[in-house]
Amino acid sequence: MHKGYLALVLHGHLPYVRHPEHENFLEEDWLYEAITETYVPLILAFERLVNDKVDFRLTMTLSPTLISMLGDALLQERYLKHINKLIELAHKEIERTRWQPEFHNLALMYLSEFSKARDTFLRYNRNLVNAFKNFQDLGKLEIITCGATHGYFPLMERYRPSVRAQVQVAVSHYESVFGRKPRGIWLPECGFYPGQDEILKEAGIRYFFSDSHGVLHGTPRPKYGVFAPVYCKGTGVACFSRDLESSKQVWSSIEGYPGDYNYREFYRDIGFDLEYDYIRPYIHPDGVRINTGIKYYRITGSGDRKEPYVPHWAQEKAAAQAGNFMFNRQKQIEYLHGLMQKKPVIVSPYDAELFGHWWYEGVMWLEFLIRKIVCDQDEIRLTTAPEYLSENPRNQVITPSMSSWGWKGYSEMWLQGTNDWIYRHLHMASERMTELAGKYPAVNGAQKRALNQALRELLLAQSSDWAFILGTGTHTEYAVRRTKDHLLRFNRLYEDINSNSIDESWLADIEYKDNIFPNIDYRVHQ
Amino acid sequence: MARVGRMKKVLSKKPLLGGKKAKSVKTKTAPQQEPAKVRLDIQELAVGTTKFSHPEMRRVPKNFPHELPGAYGADRMVLMVRDPWWLYTYWELKQETVDKLKSGLKDEFYKAKRVLRVYDVTNIIFNGSNANRFFDIQIHEFANNWYIDAGGPGRSWCVDLGLKLSDGRFITILRSNVVQTPLDGPSWITDEEWMIPDDMFARLYGMGFGLGRSSPVGKAWRERIVSSPGMASMASPVKKAARKRGFWLRVDCELIVYGATEPDARVTVQGKPINLRPDGTFTLRFALPDGKQVIPVKAISADKAEDRTITPTVTRETK
């Protein structure tokens, strides 16, 4: 008989990066790398689990921007081109490393991975969302939605129509893809402020996740801390909050699993290591060296000297760490069960792209963990929020506290000297969008298209990713450009709509460039 | 690779460290990012290099026609919450509003100090004069945004931009919205139906922050902030970050083996078949480790009637 639950949550999100106007656009690689290194490996792991009849439960966000990119024909075509080049490079590497068995075997491994990525991509008709949908339909995966473009809600608090549009657009988009409404949402950056739950309720969303202090600092005191969900006062929307102990084991730079010396070294990529003329066709067309994804070394130690990667050592380590993670959860659950006199739920959310892309062995670790929990013990049961709630419907009612899972736990990551300038523009655009939606409740033709496009541009400008990149202070130019481009397009649309002088060829051009959410309805922004 | 230097760009006019200590309450002001940024760089850099990796140079069209407007022609002041202790406000003032003040106040306008008045409006409906308390921050005339150390978690705030005249009178120019800062610790309000003894709550509280089973309540939260880097959504576990390395040298060798034969011949190198180009030429490239490599290259004619073998031998020795 189980004594508690573990809810694993993977947050899959990338900002909308799609540039049909350029043949090569480097930031699109974020998607291609994530497909090859994270999404496909996850899908293959889920397939193996299903084939082996392992009855698992996992929650995963697929943000509306990510879903849109995965389903976009242009990006699909470009991914195919990308993976074909990688396969070509892997073939060359197999040849080149003929006299170095330690690298030769790794080159063979990469060829096999890249080929599997291509096969899987093609097998699901180029749209990996189909795969995730299958696992949801099988009852293994609970797919939740996110803000339409991952806008950070606490800094939009005063602009409720924008929060509403982020949520409503996401919900209708989810419905069009999965054939039903989402039951849960991953609040972008876990950003919550009291009152936001009203908008979630309106949209039919029944639960969300917060960081630990969102609930721990809620009012009144939560009796069970983060180990039971709470219902938001006034709306009854359930809030599950993150357990930091299990988070730290994976995330932490000091004690986290991914830093193990047997694991693959992220920073030694042949895109940087190999002779320039040889690698040139596989790096950026401008000749800038970039990561290719082929990496031959293990972390080895804290110094610069790196030894070749040995896959089976890494695999053994991943299995051992999965065992360690499970052991720690068992101890944690046993203790909590005694303290609480009821079954605790431990919520462990992670960025999906951590697995595979950054932590190469992460997907393997996850699969080991799931198999061990399902097959080797019965103290912990994997669960999802809806499943937990149907078994444990009675929960405390509180008002969670404003919080995020970002740096320092609140809004500073997105509100500091390097990015605070964006808010006067974003907020003005929100005000103007509300004004437009009120002023033009029923229009047709170009006016309507312009209004819908205005909302697209506003949503795209609101992506928290731009503020985040500005906040990190490194290679900020693209984030500045995106913020400004969308706002400038919005401002021009606003003026053109109000003066009834819409330039239809320009409108068509930006509809083509910023083509997200084809069925958007600007009237949700109110 | 993407271990690029930070681009320093001044993107908005920041107030300089300003504001003398006003008499009433503390008035620490704005930009305080630097010490924090150092740590942040280390911890967040992985984001740039992994999820958002990209090299330094850019290809965005340089001649983008517009910049965002400097102002929208409105009088407005917006107040936002950064965290339990800090607020952020930005504002915009129409020229005609300034002109009106000037003509009304005459010389007084130029003598007046520009001030942010920060009101604690917790649990009241603020009417401009019933604040629980307030404090002033003197600001620069051209400032249009400010970070405010309100120092009061779990309270409601409202801010006026105003003029403080030489006779002490305060004139409000703009008033912000009201915001509420979150608590900086657990609520003191408990729920009768869901009571829990304090010591048990303390244990659950510490555990929720991943601090084991015995951390005292107050301390736990602070420790969480200090001791949990890499928690930001896209900050990955950053064991490497941007290492600064000293002088270094790396040398490797590769060997190119090339040749030509009849285009329809079959060629093997070290026993493994290779592909010829349409003109019968071929090129092979090998990483060359230390030691001796014997490389027999054998060509067999299409009709298998003839064959040729040439065997280069290469030795690499690294000292």
Image (cartoon, grey):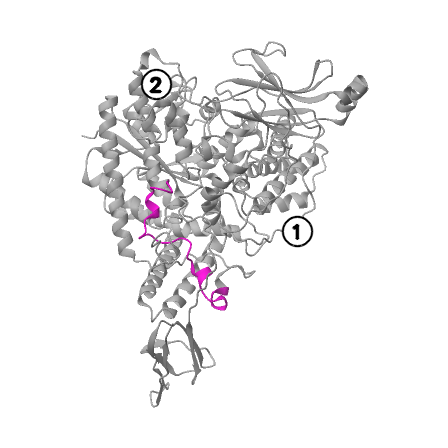
- Residue A403 lies, in percent from the top left, at 45, 28
Q: Quadrant of residue B70?
A: top right
Number of marks: 2
Q: Residue furthest bottom?
A: B305
Q: Which mark is residue A229?
A: none
- Residue B183 lies, in percent from the top left, at 45, 21
Q: Residue at x 31, y 64 (%)?
A: A102
Label 1 crowd bin: few (<14), some (14–19), many (20+), radius 10 Å:
few
- Residue B19 lies, in percent from the top left, at 64, 26
* Residue A149 in sight here: no
* Disc 2 element: loop
Q: Is residue A278 magenta?
A: yes
Q: Amino acid at mark 1?
A: Lys
Residue closest to the eye, A520 or A67: A67
Left or right relative to A464: residue B275: left
Query: How far apart are the two marked residues, 2 and 1, measured between alpha carbons?
Result: 56 Å
Residue closest to the eye, A174 or A386: A386
Label 2 crowd bin: few (<14), some (14–19), many (20+), radius 10 Å:
many
Chain bearing tag 1 is: B
Give a yes or no on whether discs 2 and 1 share a subunit.
no
Residue closest to the eye, A126 or A265: A265
* Residue A199 in sight here: yes
Q: Residue furthest top?
A: B130
Q: Which mark is residue A396?
A: 2
Q: Which residues are magenta?
A: A252-280
Judge whether B34 appears above or below B245 on screen.
above
Judge whether B279 appears above or below A270 on screen.
below
Q: Which residue is mark 1?
A: B62
Chain bearing tag 2 is: A
Q: Is residue A343 magenta?
A: no
Q: Quadrant of residue A366?
A: top left
Judge whether A135 appears above or below A304 on screen.
above
